[in-house]
Image (cartoon, grey):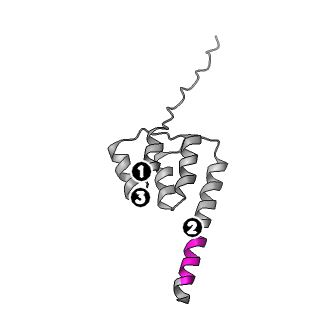
Amino acid sequence: MKVLRNSRVSLFVLATCTVLFFTGTVLSQAKKPITRQGLVNAVKSHASAPGLIEEIKVRGVDFQMTAEIESELRAAGATDQIIATARGNYRAPRPKRQRPIMP
């Protein structure tokens, strides 16, 4: 019983640290859209689904959802809500402004 309790506490501490690390990483970025690999990594790290959904809504994603990406996210453990939110929050890259050519 004590071993089970210790493993639950360890798992809780690990999950909390992971979420805090992910949150710190997210906050240190300049609100750029979340990359495909970034979302996969966050899902794999067991970050909280409501937290991920909120970040996706705020920042968007830099990829358009395809069947292949959906499969990758599902394999990583993404919920239907995470996938639907990512699908609806694609942020197209901004066109780079061209600098005027000086004569």
How far apart marks 1 and 2 lie (CA) works out to: 21 Å
Which-is-in-front pick, marks 3 and 1?
A: 1
**Dot 3, crowdedness within 10 Å: few (<14), some or many (≥20)?**
some
Alpha-carbon distance for marks 3 and 2?
A: 16 Å
Question: Residue 19: image x %, image y %?
Answer: 59, 61
Q: What element carries label 3?
A: helix
Seen in the picture, residue 91 relative to 73 is either above or below; the reply is above
Q: Who's the residue at 43% across and 54% down the image? A: 79
What span is in magenta?
A: 5-15
Q: Is mark 2 on a helix, strand or loop?
A: helix
Please say if the residues under marks 3 and 1 sit with CB atoms less than 8 Å apart: no
> In the rendered image, which residue does mark 2 sit on?
15
Check disc 1 and report the residue beneath it.
Answer: 80
Q: What element carries label 1?
A: helix
Query: Residue drawn 65% across and 55% down?
Result: 24
- Displayed quadrant of residue 14: bottom right
The residue at 46%/38% (across/down) is 88
Q: Mark 3 points at which residue?
A: 76
Indicate which disc, 1 or 2, sits on the residue closer to the N terminus: 2
Where does the C terminus fall, quadrant-wise? Answer: top right
The stretch drawn in magenta includes residue 81 = no
Q: Which amino acid does label 2 sit on?
A: Ala
Q: Where is residue 75 in the image (x, y as percent from the top left)?
A: 37, 58
Q: Nearer the viewer, residue 54 or 95?
A: 54
Q: Position of residue 20 (x, y in %)?
A: 63, 60
Indicate the amino acid at tag 3.
Answer: Ala
Q: Residue 14 vs residue 43: left or right? A: right
Q: Residues within 10 Å of mark 2 (few under 14, many from 20)?
A: some
